[in-house]
Amino acid sequence: MPLALTGISRLSIKKSSGRGHRRRDSYRSFPPFQSPPFPPHIFDAMRAARAAGTAAAAGAAARQRMAQSAPTAGRFRCLFARESATVRVGGLRAGAVEMQRRAFSGSRGLRNEEAAAKPEVVVLGPSLEQIQIDMSPSEKGRLSKLRNIGIAAHIDSGKTTCTERVLFYTGRINAIHEVRGKDAVGAKMDSMDLEREKGITIQSAATFCDWKKKNVDGVEEMFHFNLIDTPGHIDFTIEVERALRVLDGAVMVLCAVSGVQSQTITVDRQMKRYNVPRISFVNKMDRMGANPFKAVDQINHKLKLNAAAIQVPIGGEDSFKGVVDLLRMKAIYFEGEQGTTLRETDEIPPDVLPIAQERKRMLIEAVADVDDEIAELFLDEKEPTTAQLKAAIRRTTIALKFTPVMMGSALANKGLQPVLDAVCDYLPDPSEVPNLALDQRKAEAPVALVPYNTLPFVGLAFKLEESNFGQLTYIRVYQGTLKKAMNVFNARTDKKVKIPRIVRMHSNEMEEVPEVGAGEICAVFGVDCASGDTFTDGTLPYSMSSMFVPEPVISLSITPKNKTDTNNFSKAMNRFQREDPTFRVHVDSDSHENIISGMGELHLEVYVERMRREYRVDCVTGQPRVAYRETVTKHVEFDHTHKKQTGGAGDYARVVGYIEPTGSLTSNKFEQQVTGGSIDEKFLFACDKGFQAACEKGPMLQQKVLGTSMVINDGATHMTDSSEMAFKVATQQAFRKAFLQAGPVVLEPLMKTTITSPNEFQGNIVGLLNKRNAVILDTEIGPEDFTLTADCSLNAMFGFSSQLRAATQGKGEFGMEFSHYAPAPMQIQKELIAKHEKMLAEKRK
């Protein structure tokens, strides 16, 4: 049966933790002064070091004070107990250092063994390390200065505002305009009128820019960015999905007041799905109640990431002036009307210096947790140099083990330039990210793609748009070069396509280019394809995996107001389905209504408004009609004669029998038990057809009939007036008459609903289901979240997705599938029958 509301919402919580957190938690599970159970050979080393460790006791007190002053001594607190204990064990200190080394390396070895035990996917072709080794200097120089990044966050965290400043500081635009378009211009990346009116991003927008960054020698280096600004609203999450599918890195923006929010969790899950390294930017530092360190803690605990701040703020709220770079221990101030002048100084304000020193120790410890080089320095109690720490942050960020956190205020024009430097320093270039294709000739074996311009072309179409010049297809080039007038092959359809134009997008503006190299993002015209198609030059049988597409969660019936608009209505539906994989259209086989399905009420509202503006089609929307059913509950006999006399041969048919429930609400049953030949065989076949026709439209609501059995055991015919049509009509009339006497009831569809949410919202969800008269079948409670299964009426589930989001702060998810039909409550039956009779009365007028 077609369902009016199907699928699953996108908001959920993935429970995963980084290596560093597991290690740290394993140490913190012991009391502060109790050693963890190390292997016996470590204690043997301790005993052997007892005699030789006297000299080490002299420096124990100093090391002890340093350990106690550390803000988070969790990993090594048990190794630096108390000064008295250190003096008491004397020579054990040297053994303790050795114990640290062995325990540290032992824990890493254990995890390496666990990783080795997992089945590995064999990838054909060179490894990522070999690709980088064999790369020519020209290719390495080009790719090392290229970054494909996206900006993603919860709604209203300041993504588009950040992008506007990035474009201004890189020289792509000459003036800064605000998101809501108060100056009648609006932000550059919000090109749709709807986006500027509502103040939200609806479609992801791509642009490119160049950033001049000074290296350690003070020489400026030019970096090229391909940048995608994504929506923050949950209803447009597919835009984030397909952007992250083709990007090499991302900037996750958080609000300094709200911290990690519901859509932040969704964005984090999407980044983990596509293994996208990210740096975090805590925005809105000038707001009242801003607390960047709360956001850092939430990244660690809610998102299960190993994160640490690489900056601390100078001032806060209204007095926010700049930041302290913890790697170089320099204060950075953003001066000038638009923050274009950066002033760096070694003089850190006295009230900020202790916080900066403490946060730097926390940063070194967090990086030491996931990087061998920094860990060795940490164990040797040496402070890493700026270059060593920066290289370690880059390694661990690209390896998805660490997330550096920065801070600033985009609206106040403070803190964005260091973020651009961090994109260059810490996020990967295209050659540092493994990209795989599937070889169709070798049972879809994974093959490594090499970002060389000279190799055969492989690209992925990840987004479609309709423009004034036809379909605009966004393509990420993974290997080879895409040239104008080049013939490419669609791996899905195996059709050859010629590329007429190649453009670089700057929001809604275009810049035509003759060719695009490996690692770049571009758009092409005149290519007929679907979102997620792979293109090659025809020499390689490769295809690439597409992006994850969530199922729709809400549906509406839609009809154009004027029949003359049907043609434009069909064009709009076809275009929107091609552009957005989460927008679905189908015709309900029961009500014959057009049903549109999407990710939320705002999602569908935007498309209805776009139809009105872009196609001049006014539409009427409403709740989809629920597919009710009818059945009987009693055994009733009938004896019906159909007699009709006209000028010529008339109609005559008599049928005798009974109807009764079958005991199952799955199908209907017709049976003939006529003896003595009172009804001819061909007329009995017509009776069967009449019964099936009567079951298509029941007498109560003109809905289908289920679970009803009709038996004909006698009847009569006329020599000239009886016909197949007469017996078909007689059967239908007898059925309707007997049906209304057999205790008829209306059946409503019950949906098996599965809801998953954090445990703290269990009461809210049970309350929502009780309001809908749902029957809770099962509840499974886990350590952090629970899963509830219930049977609920489909009619009562309209609007449930929005209420579930509100009740769970956007963290709950649900799915529905048809379960079975059951009798509707008597009050609802009376309302439905009265509404149907009123509709029939209006039609007769």
Image (cartoon, rainbow, N blue to C red):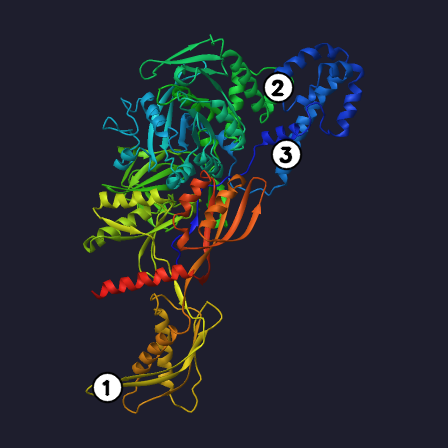
Judge the density around disc 3: few (<14), some (14-19), many (≥20) Cα neighbours within 10 Å.
some
Q: Is residue 185 visible?
A: yes
Tell me residue 520's x, y (percent): 37, 33
How much space separates mark 1 and mark 3, taking CA atoms? 92 Å
Task: Assign a secondary structure to mark 3.
Answer: helix
Residue labelled with disc 2: 378
Mark 2 residue type: Phe
Residue labelled with disc 3: 111
835 vs 218: above or below: below
Tell me residue 312's x, y (percent): 48, 18
Tell me residue 297's x, y (percent): 52, 27
Choose between 133 and 262: the one closer to the eye.
262
How much space separates mark 1 and mark 2, taking CA atoms? 106 Å
User: In the displayed structure, does residue 36 sit left or right of residue 239?
Assistant: right
Judge the density around disc 1: few (<14), some (14-19), many (≥20) Cα neighbours within 10 Å.
few
Q: Is the N terminus in the top left, top right, bottom left or bottom right quadrant?
A: bottom left
Mark 1 residue type: Gln
Task: Assign a secondary structure to mark 2.
Answer: helix
Q: Image quarter for residue 710?
A: bottom left
218 vs 109: above or below: above
Residue labelled with disc 1: 645
Task: Assign a secondary structure to mark 1.
Answer: loop
